[in-house]
Amino acid sequence: MATVALLTYGSNSTYEAGQISLSHRYSAGFSFNTSYWFSKSLDYLSSINVNNSSGTGRVGENDLAQNPFDLKAEHGRSLFDAGQRFVASGTWQMPFGRTSRGVSHALAYGWQVNLVASANSGTPFTVYDSANVSLQASSPPLSAYFASRPDLIGDPNAGPHTPTQWIGRSAFLRLNPLTQAGQFGNAGRNIANGPGLIDLDASLIKDFAVRERVKLQFRAESFNIGNHPNFSVPVADLASQNFGRILTAGPARLTQFGLKVLF
């Protein structure tokens, strides 16, 4: 027996944002730029093909609608909706060795320091129940996840916001697979907030003249220089013993050195 998958293009998205930027260049070789965004993005589906065929394993959203006959109930925050974001960058052309000569000038003059700092509020994720009380099909070969959701009976973002328990179970009520089989929970899509992000990157750069049109560039770079833990979204399956726990995080501090030939 053949299985037919039906896809619909009956969807739309909206994005609203305000942005403030400030930049300045000083005569002493220092310049900076700062930007702040306040935004909101809404849609019916964000994750399709993000993580193979489903974003659930990586970012906390299922490709499937909980109720295929009520697609309007899927309207909610986009998977990438970080309501507030701040980015600041600065560059300093270091003046040391400006008046020196010979080898001292070549070694001490022309160093450039760059800093990039960014921070944003957390992106959302969907709490679901793999027990599949609604008795809807999963999506093999796409993802094999069920889209059933619980009832919402409290604040899904009440906390305690720790890696061992980012959100609690008390805000959700699981449907009974016997007495409520075939029913749909009222919890919406992407109603829970994941952890925010804080990052600081730095680099030190110096060009050495080899010939008239050839330069050797030295680069020392450090990403996430503060080694700040940027946690991923927690386990969002109410049927899991690890529900609410954060099991993964972004990259730790990475420092690298390099030489580049410019010609």
Image (tube, helix red, strand yellow):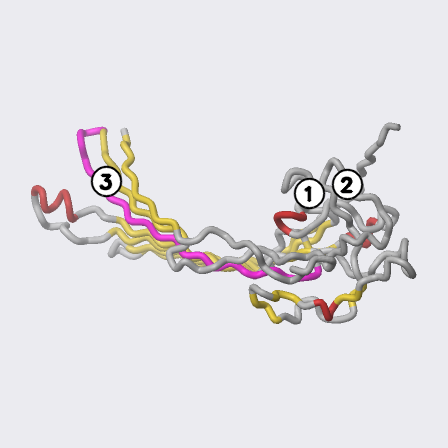
Of tags 3 and 2, which is closer to the observer?
2
First along the sequence among labels 3 and 2: 2
Point 76% across, 56% down: residue: 129
Is residue 20 among the parts visible in the rendering? no
Instruction: State the extent of the magenta-drawn residues as a range.
Output: 191-213
Q: Main secondary structure of the magenta part?
A: strand
Of tags 1 and 3, which is closer to the observer?
1
* Left or right: where 181 falls relative to 40: right
Residue 234 percent coordinates (x, y): 62, 58
SS of the residue under disc 3: strand
Is residue 92 among the parts visible in the rendering? yes
Label 3 sits on residue = 207
**Picture quarter containing residue 3?**
top right
Closer to the camera, 201 or 18?
Answer: 201
User: CB under 8 Å between callouts 2 and 1?
Assistant: yes
Tell me which amino acid carries mark 1: Ser
- Badge number at residue 139: 2
